[in-house]
Image (cartoon, helix red, strand yellow):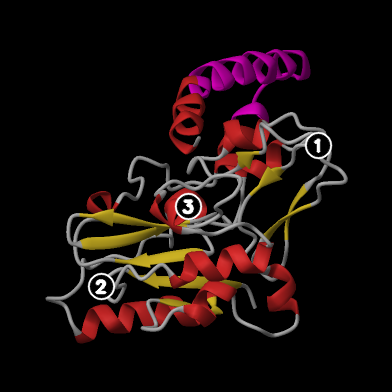
Amino acid sequence: MSKAILYDSTLCIGCKSCEGACAERWGLPYNDKIAAEENISAHKLTTVETHGDRFSRRLCMNCQQPACVSVCPVGALQKTSLGPVTYDQEKCMGCRYCMQACPFQVPSYEWEARLPRMRKCNMCYERQVEGKVTACSEACPVGATKTGNRDELIAEAQQRINDNPSQYNPKIYGIKEVGGTSVLFLSAVPFAQIGLRTNVPLEPLPDTTWRVLELLPDVVSTGAVLLGGIWWVSNRRSEVEKAEGKRK
């Protein structure tokens, strides 16, 4: 059964224990300066964001049908049956198509490294294979982040909403967005108010692309792929550059 993470913004106290645990799990530096950063980057794979008196988290959504996997030409990214999207740096050729394709602007690149890699959260895949929860879930002192089976977490999230309707926005973020994600969110306010992207499509991005291409002749399909790729890269480049600029 596919695993997932449930993050309940109404419970989060902004302690950033999840950040520290994530850094330790990946062997990344973590200090007061890094803790103050509220952007994910190659050296910070999850972050707690402050939105007024509310908190939220950013991390890889590990989509059910990830666009990053569909555009990777060498199979460096793989969606596992367990749920996480894993990355094999030995296969990666540094094309950064994943950065262009991700609707959540998650993959980060080690621009200053001698042998750069793409970096992102993989939901502690190695830990979950051993039956453990994610490092961030284990470290959370208030239960705001929880790891479990996706279907069961969705049911639990819906029960929380039903039990306390005045406390929650009556929706669960991640059930349908881009075809569904392995990270689910609960919030007391509309999701845009805690920094979540609400302009993403509900359909899986790979499915949308191939459904269009299947209707076209081979030659036209090839041209469509090339032109579509050019448009996508051009359209996304400025957005990615802005995001990378904020992360540095």
Q: Give the spatial CA distance, label 2 vs label 3.
A: 24 Å
**226 displayed left or right of 106:** right
> Which structural element holds mark 3?
helix
Query: Magenta includes 229?
Result: yes
Write down the residue under mark 1. Answer: 115
x and y, in percent, of residue 229 in the image: 63, 20
Q: Which residue lies furthest to the left in this view?
A: 166
**33 displayed left or right of 135:** left
Write down the residue under mark 2. Answer: 10
* Residue in the picture at 68% in, 20% down: 225
Foreground label between 1 and 3: 3
Between 35 and 170, the one lying in front of the other is: 35
Kind of residue sitting beneath label 2: Thr
x and y, in percent, of residue 32 in the image: 44, 57
Kind of residue sitting beneath label 1: Leu
Look at the picture and state if 207 lies above or below 20: above
Span shown in magenta: 212-237
Write down the residue under mark 3. Answer: 34
Look at the picture and state if 152 lies above or below 242: below
